[in-house]
Image (spheres, rainbow, N blue to C red):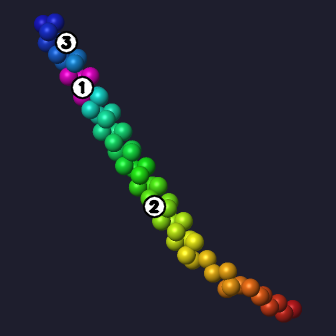
Amino acid sequence: MQIGGLNAALTAANDSGLAQAVGIAVLSKTLDLSQQQGQQLVQMMSQSVQPNLVKHVDLRI
């Protein structure tokens, strides 16, 4: 009986270790995707800047 309990405890420990490893892998992938999207956003914003667009403003009152 003690061997069965030990085996169950080891199996549970391995399962939680696997779940933790999978969670870390998913978080790592999410971090990589977030960094890539951030770089793409910066690139898009830098391409959208048009410094000569609003150089002069005409006001009439």
Mark 2 / mark 1, whichever is N-terminal = 1
Q: Nearer the viewer, mark 2 or mark 3?
A: 2
Q: Residue at x 26, y 32 (%)?
A: 18
Q: Could you tell whether 54 is left or right of 35 in the image?
A: right
- Residue 14 among magenta residues: yes
Q: Position of residue 39 (x, y in %)?
A: 49, 62
Instruction: Indicate the amino acid at tag 1.
Output: Asn
Q: Position of residue 58 (x, y in %)?
A: 80, 91
Q: Position of residue 16 (x, y in %)?
A: 29, 28
When the figure is inspected, residue 58 is found, relative to residue 28, above or below; the finding is below
Q: Residue at x 51, y 66 (%)?
A: 41
Quickly name the residue at label 1.
14
Q: Around disc 1, counting alpha carbons within 10 Å, would you say few (fewer than 14), some (14 to 19), or many (20 or more)?
A: few
Figure quadrant of the C terminus = bottom right
- Residue 48 among magenta residues: no
Front one among 47 and 12: 47
Quickly name the residue at label 3.
6
